[in-house]
Image (tube, grey):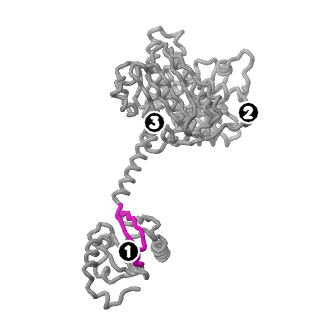
Amino acid sequence: MHASDSETTRPPATGENDLHAALHAIRYGILLLDAEFRAVFINQAFRRMWRLPDAMADSHPSFAQLLEHGWSQGFYRVQEGDHDRYFAERMAQVERLDGSGQVRLDLQDGRHLLFESVTLPNGQRMLTYADVSPLVEAVQAAESANRAKADFLSGMSHELRTPLNAVIGFAQLLEMQARDRLSAQQAGFVEYIRRGGDHLLRLIDDVLSFAKVDAGKLPVRPEAVRPADLLDDIRPIVMPLAEQAQIFVDWPDPSGFPLLLQADRMRAAQALLNLLSNAVKYSPAGSRVRLECGPGDGMFRIAVHDEGPGIPYDRQGEVFQPFNRLGREAGGIEGSGIGLALTRKLVASMQGRIGFSSRPGEGSCFWIELPLAGRVEEADPVAATPLPEAKEGEDETGVVLRGGFSLLYIEDNAPNRVLMQHVMATLPDVRYLAAASGAEGLAAARASHPDVIITDINMPDMNGYEVLQHLRAAPETAAIPVLALTSDVHPEAIERGRAAGFDLYITKPVDLAALLRGLDRLLRSRAI
């Protein structure tokens, strides 16, 4: 019960004075309530925090009266009509909290308070309030900066990939014509252009992925993955690199391990590919790269051994630092120094581990460990939908190489339209149509009924998804195969493209051979 008037005028004992002085000195707001939720004590920090006059604070107001005071000061982010509901919720909140943790109050003036309620041994209830506005603002600023950084890098990726598509594409086109039209020296120049473009593309991809992982924006979708499937994903990429560098690669047979990994298949392949490409890149011609894999301690380890120069002992602590090539900058081998730093972040995002050992002059071993997800269950294989078979004597791009079809390319970037025009000009009897906007493309599709349509995704007037939607909605264009050719390489964008109904989704800078194979597939499916 609340003390009587005569008791409130009694001078506090010396010990109580000392306690109150100590509580007044604390920078957190403190409110002591009795069993009837009337204030027994209110310290100075609370009074300043809520602009509470001393006369009111010393009159032992009820908690409801304190709420009304806050309402009169305009502290609460509440509409006028929600007064009663808000007060009832706050009263119930204080009664319910009793030692259950902190609750954040966001005030109308921009402040953020954390408060909690505990019951003291004497039955009184103590509410403590801490102003965490600087911390909340710092967190919000960091989140905003991360979003801005991710948006900026995403936009830069698109802006850089679009001109790179023309650079690499024209270089590939010239390489296709090198035997007939270029001297050996000119062919060498073209190769330098194409290799430089490829290197810049890898750098863009690595930097963007690194930034997205750093900002927590790179999606990771763990699933059960067979080790054999993971190695099968990267083998077609690694072997041509190894053959070109005259490196022998020993591949393990993971089929002997009836186990499943818990990992994002694409991210795990990216991490392992980084290790293998480094091993190939820094190993001398004629040497050997060896893969080993096996389970242990609840994890599955894949190790990459090389016979390269190794890493100096005094620099091994720098191995996973971004943009640090450990003194290899002048060695004539292309690289950005970000691959291992990115790989470590990718592996950590899948709850895995990464490590290495290295002896200068004797080579290195880098390994990753990924969590085990269980054992392989026997299941009926899923039958793949077969592609239309090529005719006898016709290679896999026979329809494209034979020509005789019409193609509409919807793309707002002029150099990319010119590139596609020249690619189609290498094929016989191809009717090439181009449109610089989504609206122009739809009009051209309705007027000319092309055999296949290629569209960009990011265009000023409408995006590629809207173009596809309009094409599918019109009876005269609904059956035309549509291929998306875009600089948006994010996995979620690729999944969205496939789910939207694009027959194929190819990213820029375009691999012309892959583009021709894709067109061949679409044209054979239409049986023109």
Tell me, yes or no, whether the highlighted magenta stretch contains residue 114. yes
Query: Image height check: is 264 above or below 71?
Result: above
- Residue placed most toward the observer, 333 or 170: 333
Position of the N terminus, as image quadrant, is bottom left
Kindly identify the amino acid type of the residue bearing the numbered disc 2. Answer: Ala
Mark 3 lies on residue: 344
Residue neighbourhood size for the residue with mark 3, other residues' Cα within 10 Å, grouped as few (<14), some (14–19), many (≥20):
some
**CB under 8 Å between callouts 3 and 1?**
no
Which residue does the image show at 27% across and 71% down from the upper left? 22
Q: Residue furthest front?
A: 297
Q: Amino acid at mark 3?
A: Arg
Residue 505 drawn in magenta? no
Q: Secondary structure at mark 2?
A: loop
- The quadrant in which residue 29 appears is bottom left
View extreme (bottom): residue: 6
Whole-angstrom CA distance, mark 3 to mark 1, is 50 Å
Q: Give the image location of residue 527, x and y in percent.
A: 73, 27
**Residue type beneath disc 1:** Gly
* Residue ID for mark 2: 383
Marked residue nearer the N-terminal end (3 or 2): 3
- Circle 1 residue: 70
Q: CA distance from mark 3 to mark 2?
A: 36 Å
Marking on residue 146: none
The boundaries of the magenta stretch are 110-132
Q: Nearer the viewer, mark 1 or mark 2?
A: 2
The residue shown at (47%, 8%) is 183
